[in-house]
Amino acid sequence: MAKKKLENLSFEEALTELDTIVGQLEQGELSLEESMAVFERGLKLSQLSQTKLQDAEQKVQMLVNQNGEQALTHFDAEES
């Protein structure tokens, strides 16, 4: 299966591929060259995912500000 270009991946697709890459690296069956190539793609996927998360956070903040709210509060899943 051909890999999609990074700029065409959704956040979910990037995370799924990153999970696959982690699994491949953990198995230890790749050659050094393959491991390095897969690791490099994994880093790029990680950076892409982080950027998409930051963009989404900024968009949420802008929407909240437009609706007159002061600020977002920190969500702590353990308190729920």
Image: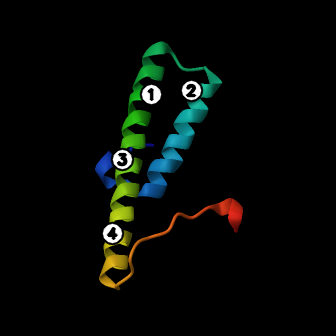
Note whether 21 is above or below 69 in the view shown: above
> Which disc is residue 39 wearing?
1
- Dot 2 or dot 1: first in sequence order is 2
Tell me the quarter of the image containing the N terminus: top left
Identify the residue under disc 4: 59
Q: Amino acid at mark 4?
A: Lys
Q: Amino acid at mark 1?
A: Phe
Q: Amino acid at mark 2?
A: Leu
Does the residue at mark 2 contact the one at mark 1 (Cβ under 8 Å)? yes
Residue at the image point whose x is 64% and y is 25% from the top = 27
The colour scheme used to paint the residues is rainbow
Front residue (pair 58, 48): 58
Does the residue at mark 1 contact the one at mark 3 (Cβ under 8 Å)? no
Confirm whether residue 5 shows in the render. no
Residue at the image point whose x is 44% and y is 29% from the top = 38
Does the residue at mark 3 contact the one at mark 4 (Cβ under 8 Å)? no
Note whether 37 is above or below 61 in the view shown: above
Distance, label 1 to label 3, CA atoms, is 14 Å
Q: Nearer the viewer, mark 3 or mark 2?
A: 3
The extreme bottom residue here reads: 67
Dot 1: element: helix
- Dot 4 or dot 1: first in sequence order is 1
In the figure, is residue 73 to the left or right of 65? right
- Dot 2 or dot 4: first in sequence order is 2
Q: Nearer the viewer, mark 4 or mark 1?
A: 4
- Dot 1 or dot 3: first in sequence order is 1
Q: Find residue 19 and report its horizontal and vertical position in percent.
A: 56, 42
Identify the residue under disc 3: 48
Distance, label 4 to label 1, CA atoms, is 30 Å
Identify the residue under disc 2: 25
**Quarter-wise, where is residue 43 in the image?**
top left
Note whether 27 is above or below 71 in the view shown: above
